[in-house]
Image: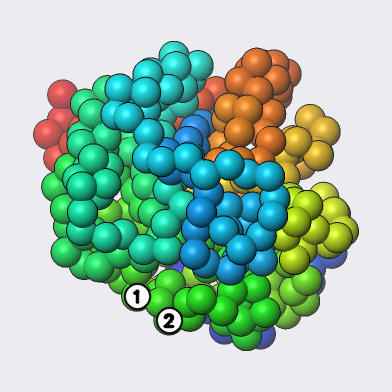
Amino acid sequence: MSADIRNNWSIEEIQSIYNTPLLELVFRAASLHRKYNDTAEVQVCTLLSIKTGGCSEDCAYCPQAARYSTGVDVHALMKKEDVLEYAAKAKAAGSTRFCMGAAWREVRDNRDFDRVLDMVKGVNEMGMEVCCTLGMLTEDQAKKLADAGLYAYNHNLDTSEEHYSEIITTRTYDDRLQTLDNVRKAGVTVCCGGIIGLGETHEDRIKMLYTLCTMPEHPESVPINALVPVKGTPLEHNRKVDVWDMVRMIATARILMPKTMVRLSAGRTDMSVAEQALCFMAGANSIFAGDKLLTTPNPSFEDDHRMFDLLGLHPREAFKEEKQYLHEVVPA
């Protein structure tokens, strides 16, 4: 293992990196990014809400919480054939990872979960990396998802442990960490990041990154989201996240976790191509494509194609790590 790949970072080291003058920070992150990744390659993911609204949680940023009046209609679990049709369109547009999100507090062992397992099998058979974000789940449920062909599970920390109770009271930080542990035990890759703009301090951002980069294994994917304030939620009046804060978070994440996919996630609709280019330079190498992120706006496939052409970027192929491993073990 390279000396750059560490799981023993200290809070003080992360503070020092995070507070580096911005241009120097971006240069350092870009250098590490170039060392460990193909800088012209971006993983293109599509996120679909397969069950929308009516969630019992009280996440202060979320328009799908039943207790807030946000104009989001409640929709039952989608039909498998509709999900597969959407996945096929995403694949045709260049996505190689397809993530299905359900507005559940936790997975329950019922017919809906059986239907999700069937969807996972269907998308997997299309040759796409399948990801789900379904709330909390047990080790046994994680194993069932793995057996169905699940490649990744998303379960974000959102913020630091200290700030967490200001944002969510219907579950604990330890609940989040337990789910991530269950995912790891099942052999599924971990997608875990957070949101900035929740009213947190810079110290909270540093502590969230500390939790991520000191896990026994770094998450394979770390989404960095900018809050999209939604009318009717407690955070509707929070101010827009400054692009430089996004660049700083992405660069710091890249330095702490050099081989991780760092995803420039929610908030891209408010960013110019030049601002997104800075994020790619700072180490972002994954995006969500498609006009919706669950219920919030996102740039269109066409806009992203134009941006990729301009910046000289191309989509990362599906299952690249596994293909490289097989090639090394069984040379052609």
Above/below status of 163 relative to 33: below
Q: Where is residue 190 drawn, in percent x and y?
A: 38, 57
The residue shown at (66%, 60%) is 68
Circles 1 and 2 in contact, beta carbons < 8 Å: yes
The residue shown at (34%, 75%) is 178
Task: Name the residue nearer the viewer: 202 or 12.
Answer: 202
Numbered marks: total:
2
Label 2, residues with CA under 10 Å away: few <14, some 14-19, many ≥20: few
Task: Name the residue nearer the viewer: 140 or 4.
Answer: 140
- Horizontally, residue 128 falls left or right of residue 176, namely left
Q: Which amino acid does label 2 sit on?
A: Asp
- Quarter of the image with the N terminus is bottom left
Residue position for label 1: 178
Instruction: Describe the element under mark 1 as helix, strand or loop.
Output: helix
Q: Where is residue 287 drawn, in percent x and y?
A: 58, 38
- Horizontally, residue 194 falls left or right of residue 118, namely right
- Quarter of the image with the C terminus is top left
Q: Where is residue 267 drawn, in percent x and y?
A: 72, 45
Q: Where is residue 309 drawn, in percent x and y?
A: 67, 16
Q: Which mark is residue 174?
A: 2
Residue 237: quarter of image: bottom right
Instruction: Describe the element under mark 2 as helix, strand or loop.
Output: helix
- Horizontally, residue 317 falls left or right of residue 13, namely left
Q: Which amino acid does label 1 sit on?
A: Gln
The residue shown at (25%, 49%) is 113
Q: Can residue 59 be seen in this view?
A: yes
Label 1, residues with CA under 10 Å away: few <14, some 14-19, many ≥20: some
The residue shown at (78%, 71%) is 199
Q: Is residue 33 visible?
A: no
Above/below status of 252 relative to 189: below
How far apart, in angstroms, are the residues tagged by discs 1 and 2?
Answer: 6 Å
- Horizontally, residue 189 falls left or right of residue 103, namely left
